[in-house]
Image (tube, rainbow, N blue to C red):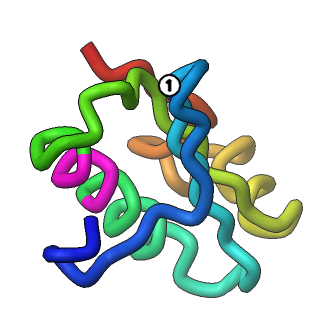
Amino acid sequence: MKKLRERIDLVDLISGVANELMVSPNNDHFGCYRDIFKVLVARNNGLKQIKSFCFICPAAAARRYEQGRRPRLRLTRHHLA
């Protein structure tokens, strides 16, 4: 996505998985939404191989999802159709 000035952290073109890594446990909801959008835009702009998205975050952020504090982002893997 060079022309869009955004980069996906890691893309496995063979298995079709886009991985986004989050280092900080802060603002995980914002980062995840931004990364979902970034992956969708990349897929619509030439990376047609992307079939799924994996958001990797620290345990502190993941616990918020498990406890239901981020109900819309509970899944760790979302398949793109």
Direction right: furthest residue: 59
Residue 75 appears in view: no
The quarter in which the C terminus is drawn is: top left
User: Seen in the image, is 59 located left or right of residue 48?
Assistant: right
| Stretch of the chain drawn in magenta | 38-42
**Quarter location, residue 5:** bottom left
User: What amino acid is labelled 1 in the image?
Assistant: Gly
Q: Nearer the viewer, residue 37 or 46?
A: 46
Q: Nearer the viewer, residue 78 or 40?
A: 40
x 33%, y 68%: residue: 34
Q: In x, y percent, where is residue 33?
A: 35, 61
x 69%, y 58%: residue: 64
Q: Residues within 10 Å of mark 1 (few under 14, many from 20)?
A: some
Disc 1: which residue: 16
User: Seen in the image, is 29 located left or right of residue 62?
Assistant: left
Direction top: furthest residue: 81
| 22 w.r.t. 20: above or below | below
